[in-house]
Image (cartoon, helix red, strand yellow):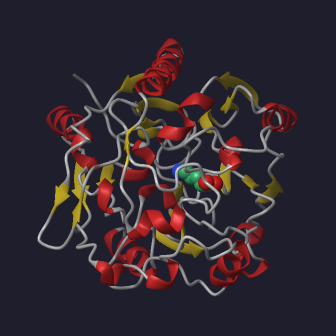
Amino acid sequence: MGTIVESWTEWDPLRHVIVGRATDCHIPPNEPALEAKVPEDSDMRGQHGKRPQEMIDKGNELLDNFAAMLEGRGIIVDRPTPTDFSLPVTTPDFHTDSQFGCMPPRDVLLTVGKEILEATMSYRCRWFEYLCYRPLMQRYFDEDPGFRHEAAPKPRLTDADYHDNYLSEKIGVEQRLKWAAEKHFVTTEEEPLFDAADVLRFGKDLVVQHGFTTNLKGIEWLKRHFPDHRVHTVNFPGDPYPIHIDATFTPLRPGLILNNPQRRLPDDQRGLFERNGWEIVDAAQPAHNQPPALCYSSVWLSMNVLALDDKTVCVEASEVYQADQLDKLGFEVVPVDLRDAYAFGGGLHCCTADVRREGGLQDYFP
Ligand code: DAV
């Protein structure tokens, strides 16, 4: 009863959120999009199958605690309904032997105003992940007469979607950085592709990362889909594995953005922010030298923080340098133990998706 879907930014006061689950999460078999993303020295190379149950239980415990903490602060929390991720995905165009999970709703669901848009995704193993959120979408549809439930066109994900020179275990970081600088990513321009976690919401402006999981056609599709927004394309040439913007570029409040110092926004893409007096500061160093075991993401999940409002930020509890920096920038820092859930698909921003934040549509870059 009484759901309202509406969220325009990453920092307005959070009132209702989805928190993912680690349940039944699988390491999917190899496929082109994964081949390009799994770091060359990763302990995940060559492995697939259901993740160890004790790690899943621990991940769920941390996600449940995070959800309970948010509820304790008066925020409504909903959870996805996992499907059976051991099932294969077969379409007329591709087959893969198992699926992924539903820990990072941020990758799948893009909330813009009163709309929640299901992203195309670009991994075959994540093709059906939206189904985990359909019970919630149906309920929001019934409860909120203003809710717009949208889905981007499902992609075909044939081999034509992937550059085959990325399909090698040994490319080397130097070559990857060269390709990133040339904007040569694993996904081709065959059809529109995007993950929701490549998009940041700044009121009337949407900032979208062009990289492995979002191609230029995907960004063009978003432009046509949101004609009342200004959609800006950014890329971060320092990132050899560019997926998702939320461990790279993190807006915290109007006028302030954290930027990963290894993945700086190029000077020629800073105009929008500089003209409007926004400050882009280097994020603090991560507290860890290595990601946890069986984790896709880099140590920069340190900056994958969740803003509860423009003065309060949830930071992973072991990320002491990031917490200290945010404290000095004037935020109330809420430490959240989540590191043992990183392996299921990310940090505090990844494992959530907005349903409602207070505040209406504003133009921050007039
Ligand atoms: O730095 O590995 C992680 C983003 C997860 N949504 C990284 C990017």
What residue is rendered at 47% in x and 76% in y? 167
196 is higher (above) or lower (below) than 23: below
Q: Residue at x 65, y 44 (%)?
A: 301
Q: Residue at x 70, y 32 (%)?
A: 311
Would you identify the image quadrant in which residue 229 lies? Answer: bottom left
Residue 111 visible in the displayed image:
no
User: Can you say whether 182 is above or below 49 in the image?
Assistant: below
Q: Is residue 233 visible?
A: yes
Residue projecting furthest to the front: 46
Q: Nearer the viewer, residue 318 or 52?
A: 52
Q: Position of residue 292 (x, y in %)?
A: 64, 38
Quarter of the image that includes the N terminus: top left
Left or right placement of residue 17 versus residue 323 in this view? left
Q: Position of residue 269 (x, y in %)?
A: 70, 77
Compared to residue 261, the image places residue 57 above or below, namely above
Residue farthest to the right? 328
Q: Hey, which residue is sitting farthest top in the picture?
A: 72
Residue 192 screen position, x and y as percent: 34, 76
Residue 103 on image: x %, y %: 41, 38
Image quadrant of residue 39?
A: bottom right
Q: Is residue 249 left or right of residue 320?
A: left
Residue at point 64%, 87% (across, down) = 182
Task: Please tell me in which quadrant of the rendered image residue 193 appears.
Answer: bottom left
Q: Where is the C terminus found, in terms of image quarters?
A: bottom right
Number of marks in the image? 0
118 relative to 274 in the view: left or right: left
Query: Which of 41/117 is in front?
Result: 41
